[in-house]
Amino acid sequence: MPRANWDVLVRYPVVIPRKQMLLHFDTFVQDIVYQIQNLIFCNRNLRRTRDLLLPRLISGEVDVEGLDIETGEGITEAAASIEEDVKKSAEVALAGEQMMLWG
């Protein structure tokens, strides 16, 4: 993996944003990091649940015949709703960033 050569890097100027911009960026990124951490935890939990249940389902040890399991359209609608919320959040964040940059 390539590494930076500090002797070369010190020759280039670096723009340091105002404190208000740094705080805004930190708040924005912090929410994303929390979401990533939450999704990692959820994925780990789902993986463990799958590993626990799948062998029992395949062997017939767990009977799911009588369960009323929602599939298809309801799941698609939930995914679309989540996607719409993410898009709105991104638009709001972008508008906030533009306002901070351009006043």
Image (tube, grey):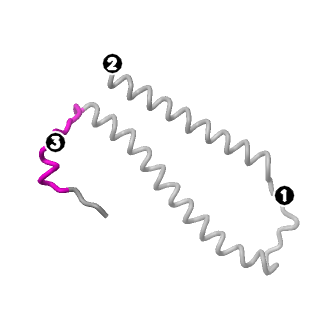
**Within-10-Å neighbours for mark 1: few <14, some 14–19, many 20+:** few
Q: Residue furthest top?
A: 103
Q: Amino acid at mark 1?
A: Asp
Residue span colored magenta = 5-19
Kindly check if marks 1 and 2 are in contact, taking CB atoms under 8 A apart as contact. Answer: no
Residue placed under numbered mark 2 in the picture = 103
> Residue at 81% across / 57% down in the picture?
69
Q: On the rendered image, what quadrant is the N terminus found in?
A: bottom left
x%, y% of residue 101?
A: 32, 25
User: How far separated are the C-alphas under marks 1 and 2?
Assistant: 54 Å
- Vertical arrangement, residue 14 with respect to residue 102, above or below: below
Q: In the drawing, does residue 69 fall left or right of residue 44? A: right
User: How far separated are the C-alphas under marks 1 and 3?
Assistant: 63 Å
Q: Amino acid at mark 3?
A: Tyr
Kindly check if marks 1 and 3 are in contact, taking CB atoms under 8 A apart as contact. Answer: no
Q: In the drawing, does residue 98 fall left or right of residue 15? A: right
Residue placed under numbered mark 3 in the picture = 12
> Residue at 79% across / 53% down in the picture?
71
Q: Which circle marks residue 68 in the picture?
A: 1
- Vertical arrangement, residue 38 with respect to residue 26, above or below: below
- Was residue 26 drawn as part of the magenta stretch in this picture? no
Dot 1 or dot 3, earlier in sequence: 3
**Within-10-Å neighbours for mark 2: few <14, some 14–19, many 20+:** few
Disc 3 is placed on an element classified as: loop
Disc 1 is placed on an element classified as: loop
User: How far separated are the C-alphas under marks 3 and 2?
Assistant: 28 Å
**Within-10-Å neighbours for mark 3: few <14, some 14–19, many 20+:** few
Dot 3 or dot 2, earlier in sequence: 3
x%, y% of residue 49?
A: 64, 69
Q: On the rendered image, what quadrant is the C terminus found in?
A: top left
Quarter residue 81 falls in: top right
